[in-house]
């Protein structure tokens, strides 16, 4: 026994050293998400409507792959570290650019089609006058150059960008930046023939239907070079050269979704996320040590190891840590406490029966294990679906939750057991003292069940009536489409002045909201993305009160419907999977139906509270609902396990309703304290986690409180009702 324990501790120390080596220095090892380091997330749709009436799936796939290749080349030239460019569905592309702060430049670089054309300009002044009068001759089009001079240009291009071999930044007249073009061998010959045949005519250089220059051809140009001049900045010339070098997109692309996080908001998110997790974690550590003494301190060691394992796994898997992911780490602490509380309470019960300390520990762990396993599996089911169907921050939350739950089972079941074994071997007369603030109760939950059934039905009914009355207002821009721009001014700005400025530039549909805690921060919701227009106007109108774009979230109506559909599928699959597991695990109609009712009860109560408190449902709230579905059933499963255990022990001499009441009363202390520790973590995120996670944490708080309520007053009594019928 002693020898095997020493080997276990040696392996544990080696494992801790390995995890520490993997994680530290943490600032260099952890891959931060866009919401923490700032950056841009885009969903692009390749517009293939103009390509062909009968486009096949193979052609569609080829166009998307070619588009991804060109976008990747452009971004590589832009210098983005570790960009992510992936296809989604048949015609969509997801682009993630971490650390990019110049959002408009990045969007222009990605979204520009870069269709370069060379077209001859008509020198017939009569035809130009006819065109200006509205009668454009056949075979021509009317355009304007960069100085707004009218040009009558032939519609057929004499050359295109396909003849280019390179594009470089140069300096033109007066040292202004320009773009120097180099043609291929075939292109050089073609350009020489065109210029030789059209001496003294103007040749327009057109990029994406815009005339950049239209110089007069003085002589044949045989060197295979040309240049695009204009009022370029150095960055504009560089980006133009990059897109021309990468090649034209095979089809136009449409930005259907944009989520931009500025560096300041990212830094604030890290600060708020870490602070809230630390505050919640410290509260949990203090409680465990004060309430369970030695058992609590052993649990705290396991919790610290749990965090280390999660961080090491994130590094090894090259997973991305997001702001909800930080909240997920905190949440796994609360869930890890659940297992430790369950074990300690089981040990306490065994000691009360007069068992020796050694026997009490062995029995406590063996009897707690089924409940720990069942309760964690249900939450893991929901988390797997978050990783599978989610994206960005949601996927990060699901990933950390899965890793944390697996790590918590390891630390709670194996690591703490090693410490208990070591202490009992070292100190033969060791006494495990624990507080018991929740007295032994003998409440008849079956008798009072109808009151709580009625209360729940009324609460959910009121919430659903409010939800129905709000209509589309129940949903955020993730599902309805639209745009939210967040600006931070140097000083607080008058809202009436801001509304006047926004109305004057023609944005009549804007909804403006000032942050109550930080009045210098303003949220502006519009139907379309107006971030650049607003930013330019604020710069012009408020030169002494600079406004910085903190974040932009813009979702088109098509993507909004798609996200709504995917969210509904994810939530439905989570509920269905958990229900199937409960049914399979307990193999009893009454337990299965009661568990299903409890899950739907908790989710509906959360939705009702969102409607009553005017909190729009977005992707993060759907994530919270799935977490609630997985976590709130934990208590129910623990109670179910206790009911079945008591049935085996007392079936012949105790009525079924008395077994249920006894089981709930026996578990009441564990139910309260595990909920208190988890709620402490989520409460810290709610109060100190910043605005981004505020609604997310609110739903978790409501759901976790409701989970305790439904376990005690809904699910377990309902088993009696269904079994009786």
Image (spheres, rainbow, N blue to C red):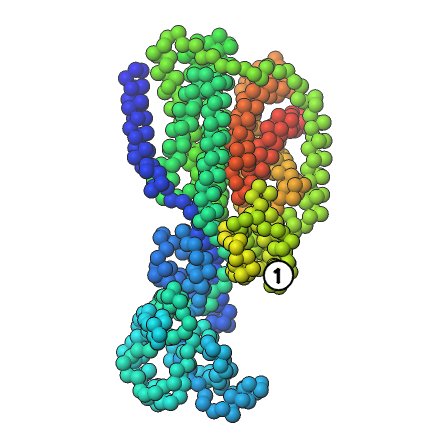
Quadrant where the N terminus sits is top left
Query: Would you say 564 lies left or right of 15 here?
Result: right
Q: Is residue 92 visible?
A: no
Q: Residue at x 65, y 26 (%)?
A: 713
Rendering coords of residue 631 (x, y %): 53, 33
Tag 1's secondary structure?
loop
Residue pushed farthest front?
Answer: 544
Q: State which quadrant residue 642 falls in.
A: top right
Q: Residue at x 68, y 33 (%)?
A: 456
Rendering coords of residue 343 (x, y %): 47, 21
The answer to which of 404 and 487 lies nearer the viewer is 487
The answer to which of 329 and 36 lies nearer the viewer is 36
Query: Would you say 278 lies left or right of 308 here?
Result: right
Image: 36 above or below 704: below
Q: Is residue 125 visible?
A: yes
The answer to which of 160 and 542 lies nearer the viewer is 542
Image: 390 above or below 417: below
Quadrant where the C terminus sits is top right
Dot 1, crowdedness within 10 Å: few (<14), some or many (≥20)? some
The answer to which of 299 and 37 lies nearer the viewer is 37
Image: 370 above or below 76: above
Query: Would you say 323 lies left or right of 133 here?
Result: left
> In the rendered image, which residue does mark 1 sit on?
507
Rendering coords of residue 219 (x, y %): 32, 88
Image: 696 above or below 199: above
Q: Residue at x 54, y 86 (%)?
A: 131
Query: Would you say 224 lies left or right of 85 here?
Result: left
Q: Residue at x 36, y 70 (%)?
A: 177
């Amino acid at each position: 026994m002693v020898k095997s324990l020493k080997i276990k501790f040696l392996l544990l120390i080696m494992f801790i050293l390995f995890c520490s080596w993997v994680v530290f220095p943490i600032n260099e090892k952890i891959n931060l998400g866009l919401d923490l380091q700032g950056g841009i997330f885009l969903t692009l749709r390749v517009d293939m409507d103009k390509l062909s009436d009968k486009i096949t799936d193979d052609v569609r796939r080829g166009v998307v792959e070619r588009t991804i290749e060109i976008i990747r080349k452009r971004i590589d030239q832009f210098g983005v570290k570790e960009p992510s460019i992936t296809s989604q569905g048949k015609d969509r592309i997801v682009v993630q650019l971490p650390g990019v702060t110049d959002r408009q430049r990045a969007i222009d670089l990605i979204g520009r089609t870069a269709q370069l054309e060379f077209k001859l300009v008509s020198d017939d002044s009569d035809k130009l006058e006819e065109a200006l009068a509205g009668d454009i001759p056949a075979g021509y089009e009317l355009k304007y150059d960069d100085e707004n001079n009218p040009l009558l240009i032939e519609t057929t291009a004499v050359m295109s960008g396909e003849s280019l071999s390179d594009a470089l930044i140069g300096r033109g007249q007066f040292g202004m930046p320009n773009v120097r073009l180099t043609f291929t061998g075939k292109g050089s010959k073609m350009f020489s023939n065109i210029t030789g045949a059209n001496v003294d005519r103007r040749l327009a250089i057109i990029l994406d239907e815009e005339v950049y220059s239209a110089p007069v051809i003085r002589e044949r140009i045989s060197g295979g070079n040309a240049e695009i001049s204009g009022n370029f900045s150095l960055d504009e010339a560089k980006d133009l050269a990059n897109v021309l070098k990468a090649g034209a997109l095979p089809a136009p692309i449409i930005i259907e979704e944009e989520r931009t996080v500025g560096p300041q908001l990212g830094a604030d998110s890290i600060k708020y996320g870490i602070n809230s997790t630390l505050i919640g974690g410290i509260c949990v550590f203090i409680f465990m040590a004060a309430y369970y003494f030695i058992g609590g301190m052993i649990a705290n060691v396991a919790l610290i190891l749990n965090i280390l394992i999660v961080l090491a796994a994130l590094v090894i898997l090259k997973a991305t840590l997001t702001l909800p992911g930080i909240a997920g780490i905190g949440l796994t602490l609360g869930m890890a406490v659940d297992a430790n509380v369950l074990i300690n309470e089981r040990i306490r019960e065994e000691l009360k029966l007069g068992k020796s300390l050694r026997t009490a520990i062995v029995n406590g762990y063996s009897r707690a294990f089924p409940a720990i396993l069942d309760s964690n599996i249900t939450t893991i089911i929901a988390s797997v679906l978050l990783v599978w169907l989610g994206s960005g921050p949601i996927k990060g939350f699901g990933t950390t939750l899965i890793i944390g739950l697996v790590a918590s089972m390891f630390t709670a079941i194996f690591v703490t057991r090693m410490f208990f074994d070591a202490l009992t071997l070292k100190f033969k007369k060791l006494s495990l003292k624990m507080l018991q603030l929740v007295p032994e109760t003998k409440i008849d939950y079956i008798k009072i069940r109808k009151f709580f059934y009625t209360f729940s039905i009324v609460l959910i009914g009121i919430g659903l009536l409010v939800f129905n009355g709000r209509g589309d207002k129940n949903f955020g821009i993730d599902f309805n489409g639209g745009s939210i721009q967040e600006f931070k001014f140097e000083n607080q700005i008058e809202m009436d002045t801001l509304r006047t400025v926004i109305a004057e530039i023609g944005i009549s549909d804007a909804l403006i909201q000032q942050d109550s805690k930080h009045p210098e921060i303003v949220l502006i919701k519009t139907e379309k993305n107006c971030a650049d227009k607003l930013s330019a106007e604020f710069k012009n109108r408020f030169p002494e009160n600079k406004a910085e774009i903190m974040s932009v979230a813009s979702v088109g109506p098509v993507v909004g419907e798609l996200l709504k559909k995917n969210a509904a599928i994810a939530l439905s699959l989570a509920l269905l999977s958990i229900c199937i597991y409960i049914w399979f695990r307990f193999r009893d109609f009454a337990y299965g139906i009661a568990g299903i009712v409890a899950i739907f009860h908790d989710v509906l109560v959360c939705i009702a509270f969102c409607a009553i408190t005017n909190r729009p449902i977005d992707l993060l709230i759907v994530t919270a609902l799935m977490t609630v579905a997985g976590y709130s059933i934990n208590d129910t499963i623990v109670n179910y396990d206790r009911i079945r255990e008591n049935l085996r022990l007392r079936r012949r001499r105790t009525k079924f309703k008395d077994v249920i009441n006894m089981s709930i009363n026996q578990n009441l202390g564990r139910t309260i304290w595990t909920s208190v520790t988890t709620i402490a973590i989520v409460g810290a995120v709610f109060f100190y986690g910043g605005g981004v996670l505020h609604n997310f944490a609110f739903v978790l708080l409501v759901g976790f409180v409701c989970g305790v309520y439904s376990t005690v007053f809904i699910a377990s009594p309902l088993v009696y009702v269904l079994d009786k019928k």
